[in-house]
Image (cartoon, rainbow, N blue to C red):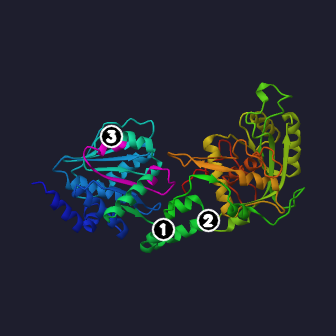
Amino acid sequence: MPLTQQQLLKTALRDVALFSSRLTGIRLRSYQQVVAQAVLASVFGERGRSFVIMFPRQSGKNELQAGIEAYLLLVLSQQPAEIVKVSPTWKPQSQNAMRRLERVLQANHLTRQLWRKENGYIYRIGQARATFLSGAPESNIVGATASTLLEVDEAQDVLVSKFDREIAPMAASTNATRVFWGTAWTAATLLGRELRLARLAQQSDGIRRVFTLSAEQVAAEVPAYGDYVRAQVAMHGRDNPMVRSQYFSEEVDGAGGMFNPGRVALLLGDHPRLEQPRAGHIYAGLLDVAGEDENQGSVHTMLTNPRRDSTALTVVEVDTATLADDLIRRPTYRVVHRRTWQGVRHASLYSQLRALADHWRMAHLVVDATGVGAGLSAFLSQALPGRVIPFNFSLRSKSQLGWQMLDLVEQGRFKEYHPPDDLFLRQLRAVEYEILPGVGQVMRWAVPEGARDPVDGALLHDDLVLSAALVGVLDSLEWHTSRPATVLPGDDPLRELDRGF
């Protein structure tokens, strides 16, 4: 006969440690056990509570989810029970979640012969079912019902509007327990909103609903994890937004000034500006291309973005000594020279840039090939075979460059010459950012339209900053201590810029 709800609750709370090892083959750590106890108490007691669970990356969140799902499918198999799990994307996130559940179900003798898969996304034991759905903006998931448990995985990447309109109603008529799993990000995310609501609820009745875990707590039970996180901190910096959110469950600001005084101070170097290369050193150029003078060209060569009215070249000296540091293994980039051109025809600019590339013996020249820069980039590629790396700005690629620039600054691997270029620093201080909702941690950043230079009141642009940020393309290359980096045909210079350590 089916167990009563009270019997299920008593069994679950008594055997939560056993369920991990005997039922699923996974032995839960203490911080996982308290989460499992709270969720199961709400499910079996029909409390309909809402939980927010923020674990650091690689600390066992996904394994805990699969364990709870497998346990509920088996224990509730004799009665109608519906579990719905929503992930930000179908591929790979929903598919990964399904594979984890399959491994747990198949690994244990109690479930190995019982579970079945239906329609490619539903797992069933008896009358209990677990349905996996995508929470992507374009997905159509209206109509599913979660009678037992509604899970939103990586809730920081699911749009609030998507949840409110299509996901929340799944548990509305059943008062099912809701669990928001994820990694800290900004307060404006779905996870951030539910975190505040859960805190208010637990303050009201004293029942714990929020479980936030930091790297230190995981390291207390898994010393190797502590070693790994310490290496990440050494590599990226403790104040790096990704380190703070992904390993210490700290929310980051969703908007504001991108280069605060601390970051500006970190990028100030003590090396001099140079007018010519030093023997035995590697140099590279970073070129942000503006349009030609509007009075000299056709409508097709007019400036496409009036804020970027100067072509800016940043020359960096590539120090490969830090490749030998086991915690870094990447070069250090020191700005040694900077040039700007305003309203110069690209035919004249081409000859100057070719001469500068030869003068500095540039191993690489990263060129903004967006829009009007495409032609200039193509001509330079022909003149400097194997040395030019075209780069196309888009919302995503610029976001990646922004994250990489922050990474380099906080690691101390991007340094401005001394005394610094005052205009460059003023542009840096004026840059503002906004983290967009949804998957991908996309950051929009720029000097705001209409911003004025505090020195002379003129319009302030971001050409020097964009030129410097192209250093992220250099940092995606394979560098060696004995020779410059190389880019093979078909290589993607942005292949390592994707976030998520």
| SS of the residue under disc 3 | loop
Residue 93 numbered tag: none
Quick check: can you spot residue 154? no
Residue positioned most to the top: 298
Residue 11 x %, y %? 19, 64
**First along the sequence among labels 3 and 2:** 3
Q: Which of marks 3 and 1 is nearer the N terminus?
A: 3
Residue contact at pointers 3 and 1, CB within 8 angstroms: no
Instruction: Give the residues drawn in magenta, as a range.
Output: 167-192
Residue denoted by label 3: 120
Pinpoint residue 69: horizontal percent, then vertical percent: 29, 54
- What secondary structure is found at the residue carrying circle 1? helix
Q: Nearer the viewer, mark 3 or mark 2?
A: 2
Residue that lies at the very extreme toward the left in this rendered image: 1
Residue 81 x %, y %? 22, 48
**Quarter holding residue 38:** bottom left
Placement of the C terminus among the 4 image quadrants: bottom right
Q: Which mark is residue 237?
A: 2
| Residue at 78 percent of width and 52 percent of height | 454
Describe residue 291's horizontal placement relative to residue 404 as left or right.
right
Q: Which amino acid does label 2 sit on?
A: Gly
Neighbor class of circle 2 (other Cα within 10 Å; few <14, some 14-19, many 20+) is many
Q: At numbered mark 2, what does the secondary structure look like: helix, strand or loop? A: loop
Label tally: 3
Structural crowding at the residue carrying mark 1, measured as other residues with C-alpha within 10 Å and reported as few (<14), some (14–19) or many (≥20): many
Q: Mark 1 points at which residue?
A: 215
Of marks 3 and 1, the one in the foreground: 1
Q: In this view, does 464 lie to the left or right of 108?
A: right
